Image (spheres, helix red, strand yellow):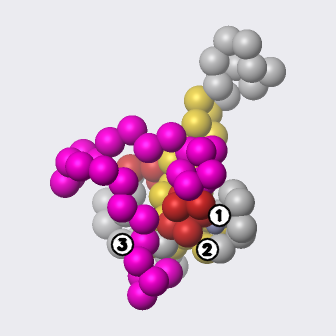
C-alpha cells in the first residue's frame, strides 16, 4: 500500500506515513516521518465552529515555530525535560 502524505503547512515539505500496511487508524494517531500530523478542532467563536481538520508540520518548521514563539512547547511526554531542536545531521 502506498504511504499517505501531507504537505507541511508552512513550507510544503512532505510528511510521510511510516507504516501504511498497519491496521487502520485515524491519521493523527499514526506514525509519521519528518514531522507531525495533528488534528485541529474549532470551537465557539470561530467561523469554523464544529469543524475538525487534519494538517501537518515538518520537523524543521516545528523547530522554527518554537524558536519564533508561534508554537508553544508544552512537554516531552516520553523523555521529560526541555525542548531539544533537531541537530544538523537530522535536518
Ligand atoms: Zn515545513
**Residue behind mark 2:** 14
**Residue behind mark 3:** 19
Q: Is mark 1 within 8 Å of ligand 1?
A: yes
Taking the spot 44% from the left edge, 44% from the top edge, the residue there is 73
Distance from disc 2 to disc 1, alpha carbons, whole Å, reads: 6 Å
In the image, is 83 to the left or to the right of 53? left
Is residue 51 placed above or below 37 in the rendered structure? above
- Residue farthest bottom in this picture: 89
Q: Nearer the viewer, mark 2 or mark 3?
A: 2
Q: Report if residue 81 lies within the magenta region.
A: yes
Can you give x and y, in whole percent of width and height, for residue 43 in the image? 63, 18
- Residue farthest left in this picture: 79
Q: Are marks 2 and 3 in contact (CB under 8 Å)?
A: no
Q: Which residues are magenta?
A: 65-91
- Residue farthest right in this picture: 47
Residue 8 badge: 1
Q: Identify the mark nearer the N-term, 2 or 1.
A: 1
Amino acid at each position: 500500500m502506498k504511504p499517505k502524505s501531507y504537505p507541511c503547512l508552512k513550507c510544503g515539505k512532505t510528511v510521510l506515513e511510516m507504516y501504511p500496511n498497519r491496521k487502520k487508524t485515524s491519521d493523527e494517531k499514526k506514525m509519521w516521518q519528518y514531522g507531525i500530523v495533528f488534528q485541529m478542532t474549532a470551537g465557539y467563536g470561530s467561523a469554523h465552529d464544529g469543524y475538525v481538520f487534519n494538517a501537518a508540520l515538518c520537523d524543521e518548521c516545528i523547530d522554527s515555530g518554537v524558536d519564533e514563539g508561534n508554537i508553544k512547547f508544552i512537554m516531552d511526554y516520553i523523555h521529560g525535560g526541555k525542548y531539544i531542536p533537531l541537530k544538523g545531521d537530522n535536518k
